[in-house]
Image (spheres, grey):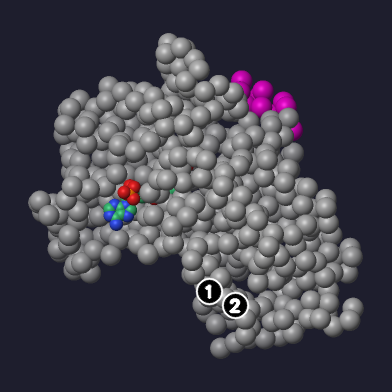
Amino acid sequence: MSVENNDQHYDVLVVGAGFAGLYLLHRLRAQGMRVKVFEAGDDVGGTWYWNRYPGARCDVESLEYSFSFSEELQQEWKWSERYAGQPEILRYLQHVADRFDLRRDVLFNTRVARARFSPARNEWTVNTEAGEQYRARYCVMATGNLSKASVPDIPGIESFKGRWFHTSAWPKEPVDFTGLRVGVVGTGSTGIQLVPRVAEQARHLYVFQRTANYCIPLRNGPQDAGIERDVKGRYAAVRKQARESPSGVAGFNVPTQSVLEVRPEEREAAFERRWNWGGIGLTRAFNDVLFNEESNRIASEYVKRKMREVVKDPKVADALTPTYPIGTKRLCADTGYFQAFNRDNVTLVDIRRSPIRAMGPHSVETGEATYEVDALIFATGFDAMTGTLLAIDIGVENGPTLRSLWADGPHAYLGLMVAGLPNLFMVTGPGSPSVLSNVVVSIEQHVEWITNCLAHMQERGLDHIEALADAQQTWGDHVNEVAGRSLLAKASSWYTGANIPGKPRGFIPYMGGVGAFRAHCDEVARNGYQGFALSTARQAQGSPA
Ligand code: NAP
């Protein structure tokens, strides 16, 4: 049943209560706007609410993977580890929600099914799956880049008698694998975190690997008190450096040299420093690892060699050795991943050579063998960046839908708006640095840009904004041109949509860097929101103002 009354009218409707939705709510409220946030989960947290699988952890350091908008918050919050685990990040976001009194405007357990813009009323109507209806002048999709799970369609899965899981829909209560035979499908960032933890419990663990990945040891540990003091003592400068950096991380120096212009022992030392420092910064030891095939080959060989030093069985080491250029799929950071394959209770199964064909009541079958399992975990990733948005039926009354506009792949201006869909914003949408960056930095940048834009409009009595098609096209061409210079655009990865059967192929995020992107967005705003048409609704409809 649709419910319509004045209580359901807002200035802004926000979809999602993760990092992006929470900060949007905080900012919009401060601007005096009436906001309602829809959240499918029963609590805040977004990604960090859903991804509760064993070993889930962020591979950006916590002192940087956190909000910068409140000095008190960043000074008072104490991270226990260098890289916080999922429970701690979720606690942090719960703390943020409580501290800024955000929960009262969030509708939990509420999934949005449809959003329609009415040109006549100049407003969005949002319908929830439960059949409720809400209206507002503006709508913001704060839905996250990695939230629509991809689960392989395996014949016979319905006959499986054990429990199966996707890592992003992990149960709240701990799952005990003690004594069980467990299968894990997928060896990306998630699988790599999960495997060592499950191996500690399971009677036997089968790791079904389609693509071997590069992993750098994370080298997590308790948060170093000296580093914390140092960062907190100059937090404003650290945050500024992060905002102006290529990847949204202050801790990485911007490389200036090519792999090819230094002597072999120098580059070995540079890689070694990064390796020992830990985490995903290794490809940033030089400026061309992601751009030059020979430089990339040298970096790839270095990491392969390091990995092989860990794995005792040479055949298993061969199977675990990646065959693609490093960094062209998301680099993984591990804690004991390769070591897990030295355990007697872990078996690597190569499903590139012989794919999974079917599942039985107690088994997974490849073309070569049948593996008896009591539980199966899919760490098979996401329909990234576009999947969550396209899952919602978004469109204009008697006009275009997002699905029609993106039939051949996503088109967006600065990852913020889609031409043809007025008054609808996205946070870290396609064509923005999003998943290539410390996403909290990118979220803050987009949220601040959107809220500043709405304040600008409010001050001028404007209530209608649209991205212009030609500006969107020019930006899209630039995104493609920058991606085309790198090796990433050539890879089969979720960056290009290659992991989802039938998804249009094309490099989705912006590779030009967080700092350059921010500067460009700021310039667009300074120049009167260049590439956007700002007006009153009456003007937009062609009536005299
Ligand atoms: P992912 O990187 O897409 O990895 C999915 C894995 O499942 C890949 O090994 C993939 O193989 C495999 N796979 C997918 N479909 C399959 C199928 N039908 N049959 C067999 N294997 C299949 O997903 P993810 O590991 O969940 O990570 C997604 C992103 O989330 C990461 O890249 C990262 O940005 C983020 N993340 C970050 C952290 C962290 O901060 N530490 C942790 C987890 C996730 P192919 O490679 O052959 O497709």
What is the x, y in percent for residue 253? 60, 25
Q: Amino acid at mark 1?
A: Ser
Tell whether 163 sits left or right of 101.
left
Residue 374: image quadrant is: bottom left
Tell whether 134 sits left or right of 298.
right
Residue on which the image places disc 2: 400
Nearest the viewer among 271 and 111 is 271
What range of the chain is rendered magenta?
226-236
Label 1 SS: helix
Looking at the image, residue 363 lies above or below residue 290: below
> Which label sits on residue 404?
1
Quadrant of the image for the N terminus? bottom right
Q: Amino acid at mark 2?
A: Pro
Which secondary structure class fits the magenta region best?
Answer: helix
Nearest the viewer among 361 and 354 is 354
Q: Residue at x 22, y 48 (%)?
A: 352
Looking at the image, residue 534 lies above or below residue 59: below
